[in-house]
Amino acid sequence: MQTIILGGGCFWCTESVFLSVKGVQSVTSGYTGGDATTANYKAVCGGNTGHVEVIKVEFDESIISLEIVLDIFFATHNPTTKDRQGNDVGSQYRSVVFYTDEDQKPTIDRTINKLRDMGLDVVTEIHPIGEFFDAEEYHQDYFNKNPEQGYCQFSIPPKLAKLRKEFNEYMIS
């Protein structure tokens, strides 16, 4: 098992994508990367803690590689906008990868360099993981619990459609 922490905008969106991927054992929405000694939704959305909305992805590398996890992550969010994903604006929505093992960093660097070689101006930050705070329970598995919520209806289906189109072989049927 491996764990990687991914920030690509609202955690409801990134969580929805990775809950649909074979080999992913769990996805936990949360906060990390800030200076405050605790994090919660209200404080993080205020933009003063330095934390990012992220997901902790635990996956079985015998089923899906870190490289494919990262390819899915970069394909389903915009890694070229600083502190923004669509209508979500603020440092808490920045594109970032927090690695949990030094052995992951070369794969992360290689994946980002591949995107840059394709002409993308990737602004994704890379950091070792610090303290991770689970998001409040109502944020966990949010889309599945609230499929009719307006933001979810607008933001998540296009990401899932892109996942299905580009990574169908890695989707849970």
Image (cartoon, rainbow, N blue to C red):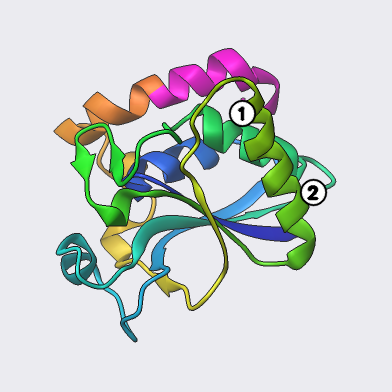
Q: Give the residue at x 71% y 56%.
A: 105
**Relative image position of residue 33 (x, y in whole percent):** 42, 69
Report whether 82 appears left or right of 99.
left
Q: Is residue 37 above or below residue 139?
A: below
Residue at the disc numbered 2: 61
Q: Which mark is residue 115?
A: 1
Residue at (66% x, 67% y) in the render: 100
Q: Which mark is residue 53?
A: none
Q: Residues within 10 Å of mark 1 (few under 14, many from 20)?
A: some
Q: Secondary structure at mark 2?
A: loop
Q: Residue at x 15, y 31 (%)?
A: 150
Q: Nearer the viewer, residue 146 or 120?
A: 120
Q: Quadrant of the C terminus?
A: top right
Whether residue 22 is visible here, answered yes or no, is no
* Dot 2 crowding, Cα within 10 Å, few <14, some 14–19, many 20+: some
19 or 124, nearer to the observer = 124
Q: Is residue 1 above or below residue 166?
A: below
- Please, what is the dominant secondary structure of the magenta stretch? helix
Q: Is residue 155 above or below residue 10?
A: above
Q: Is residue 106 left or right of residue 43?
A: right
Q: Quadrant of residue 78?
A: top left
Cα distance in 3D space between marks 2 and 1: 22 Å
